[in-house]
């Protein structure tokens, strides 16, 4: 049976993480576990995860795992750390990851897994910018910036994906044994998808609707300056990867 492990990188997601884990595990269609990689969040995210774990885990089956990092911080390295555990310690066949702010609906994880298991994709990408997808979480400015950056990415890197900055991903283990994540924040996603497409892996987009975070704070920020700082890194990554 295919084992799926969903890596959940957290920093101060106390009020989101329990509902997220429950939403993922309730909607799972194959053996499925979650691994939270928490960077020692001061808000007590780890305690909430431990409480959820005690409800789901039995002596025989671990469905909720937690790894608290104290020496290192950062989104990309947290996801890569989770991927390494998922492959080496849990023997996952498919690894998925996502934001933990409930902006990516937990029920949609099963749709990404379906695209791999039933439709033969190597990587499934949750996409806001294909038919059926949307972003109702952000205002006009952030949505427009995302569309411009992704439009530029499609022009430079090709149209195997239309949401290069998705961050809502499922991958076969083999892909992740070949490609490691590079970068600090969201640009890792552009980098991974562009390299995967070049390696000949089959990418499939699964439309999803990004909804507003209701608890906690965005780590990207909310004003134009924050978006421009992140956007500049994204554009630099796209340009670096041009053929
Ligand atoms: N482990 C870890 N997770 C992080 C870090 N920074 C952000 N995250 C998580 O990464 C995800 C994306 O962050 P979010 O605040 O939603 O950013 P946004 O979607 O760009 O507004 C969330 O699950 C955060 O909790 C970090 O330094 N370490
Ligand atoms: Mg988010």
Image (tube, helix red, strand yellow):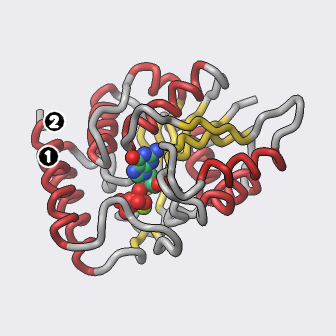
Residue 1: x percent and y percent? Answer: 76, 29
Marks 2 and 1 close (CB-CB < 8 Å): yes
**Which residue is situated farthest in the right direction here?**
59
Residue 26 in which image quadrant: bottom right
Q: Secondary structure at mark 1?
A: helix
Q: Is residue 206 above or below residue 131?
A: above
Marker disc for residue 148 = none
Q: Is residue 84 above or below residue 232?
A: above
Task: Report the front residue among 135 and 51.
Answer: 51
Locate residue 7, reporting x and y percent. 56, 41
Residue, far front: 42
Residue 154: image location, x then y, percent: 21, 51
How packed mark 1 is, by other alpha carbons closer than 10 Å (few <14, some 14-19, many 20 or more), is some
Task: Tell me: 166 left or right of 153.
Answer: right
In the image, which is nearer the foreground, mark 2 or mark 1?
2
Left or right of residue 229, residue 107 in this image: right
Q: Which x, y percent locates residue 238? A: 16, 44
Q: Which residue is mark 1?
A: 156
Determine the secondary structure under disc 2: loop
Residue 167 in sight here: no
Distance from Cα at disc 2 to Cα at disc 1: 8 Å
Does 121 sit above or below residue 127?
Answer: above
Return the residue at label 2. 241
Measuring 29% from the left and 72% from the top, which residue is drawn there?
222
């Amino acid at each position: 049976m295919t084992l799926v492990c969903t890596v959940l990188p957290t920093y101060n997601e106390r009020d989101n993480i329990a509902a997220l884990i429950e939403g993922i595990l309730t909607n799972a269609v194959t053996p499925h576990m979650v691994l939270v990689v928490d960077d020692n969040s001061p808000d007590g995210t780890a305690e909430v995860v431990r409480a959820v774990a005690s409800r789901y885990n039995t002596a025989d089956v671990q469905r909720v795992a937690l790894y608290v990092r104290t020496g290192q911080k950062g989104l990309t390295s947290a996801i890569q750390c989770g991927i390494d555990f998922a492959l080496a310690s849990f023997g996952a066949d498919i690894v998925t990851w996502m934001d933990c702010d409930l902006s990516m609906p937990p029920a949609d994880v099963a749709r990404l897994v379906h695209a791999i298991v039933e439709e033969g994709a190597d990587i499934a990408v949750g996409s806001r910018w294909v038919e059926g997808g949307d972003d109702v979480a952000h205002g006009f400015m952030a949505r427009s910036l995302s569309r411009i950056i992704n439009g530029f990415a499609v022009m430079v890197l090709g149209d195997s994906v239309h949401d290069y900055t998705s961050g809502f991903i499922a991958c076969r283990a083999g892909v992740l044994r070949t490609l490691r994540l590079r970068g600090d924040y969201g640009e890792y996603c552009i980098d991974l998808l562009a390299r995967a497409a070049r390696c000949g892996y089959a990418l499939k987009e699964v439309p999803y609707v990004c909804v507003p975070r209701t608890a906690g704070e965005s780590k990207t920020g909310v004003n134009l300056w924050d978006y421009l700082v992140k956007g500049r890194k994204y554009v630099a990554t796209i340009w670096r990867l041009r053929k």
